[in-house]
Image: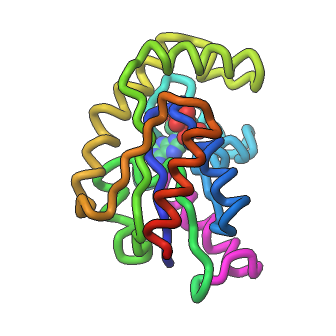
Amino acid sequence: MNAFLIFGPPGSGKGTVGAKLAAVTGVKHLSTGDIFRGLSPASESGKLFASYAGAGKLVPDEVTIQIFSRYVNGLVDTNKFDPEKDYFLLDGIPRTVAQADLIKSVVNVKHVFVLDVPDDSVIVERLLRRAKIEGRKDDADESVIRARLKEYETKTAAVLSAYDSSLITKINGNQSPNAALRDTLGAYLMVND
Ligand code: ADP
C-alpha cells in the first residue's frame, strides 16, 4: 500500500491539516487516534485504549498494529480503499520504531510531512483550548499533555531517522491552520508532480 505520513507532536495540527489535505487531494486520511476513539468503550481493546490514552501513554505496539491492520483490511474488503490506485495519509502511525518496522513490509512510504511546533507551551495552550471545544479528556489535563509530549519526544521523533531525509519535509506548525495547510499542500504537490 502506498502512503504519505503526517507527523508532529500532539496539538501540532496533524488532524486538521490531514483532513483538509485529504479533502483537496483525494488521499485517504487515516488517524489512529480517531480509530481508537471509535472503539466501543466496553470492548477489551476499547478499555485498553482508555487506560493508556488517559495517562498520555502510547498503546502497546502489538495491539496497535493489530487494530490498525484490522481496520485497513476492512477498508480494502469493503472497496473503500483500493491498494492498486489509492494512497493513504497516515496520521498517528507509526509512532515507534517497532511500529515502523512492523508496517514496513506492507506500507510503501512516499513522503513524510512533519508539523513542527518547537515550543511546548504553545501546544499545551492549544490542547487546553481544544479540550473545551471537543471535550477530549486527554486534552483537559496538563500533566497528561506533558506525558504525551514526552512520548513523542522519546519514542516518535526517533521514527523519523528510519526514513531517508529526502523523504521528509518539515512544515512550520507554529502558524494558522490554513497557512500550515498551504505549506503541506505545496510540499505534497512538489513530490507528486
Ligand atoms: P495526539 O497526537 O493529539 O496525542 P491522537 O489522537 O493521535 O492524539 O492519539 C490519541 C491517543 O491514542 C494517544 O495518546 C495514544 O494513547 C493512542 N495512539 C494513537 N496512535 C497510536 C499509535 N500509533 N501507537 C500507540 N498509541 C497510539
Which is more toward the observer, 75 or 186?
Answer: 186
Nearer to the camera, 153 or 71: 153
- Specify whether residue 74 is painted magenta: yes
Q: Residue at x 30, y 55 (%)?
A: 98
Compared to 183, does 57 lie above or below?
A: above
- Number of numbered discs: 0
Q: Nearer the viewer, residue 125 or 181?
A: 181
Rendered position, 56 above or below 189: above
Query: How far across and how far down the image is residue 77, in percent?
Result: 70, 81
Q: Position of residue 184 (x, y in %)?
A: 52, 51
Tell me the colour scheme of the image. Answer: rainbow
Residue at horizontal 57%, vertical 37%? Answer: 13
**Magenta region, mostly helix, strand or loop?**
helix
Name the residue located 56 percent from the left edge and 56 percent from the top edge: 185
Report whether 109 appears left or right of 6: left
Which residue is painted at 39% across and 19% down in the image? 119
Position of residue 24 relative to residue 60, above or below, is below
Asked if one can make out residue 51 in the rendered structure from this viewpoint, the answer is no
Bounds of the magenta segment: 64-82
Answer yes or no: is residue 30 visible: yes
Q: Nearer the viewer, residue 87 or 141?
A: 87
Q: Does the magenta portion include 39?
A: no
47 up-or-down from 74: above or below: above
Answer with left or right where residue 136 lies relative to residue 168: right
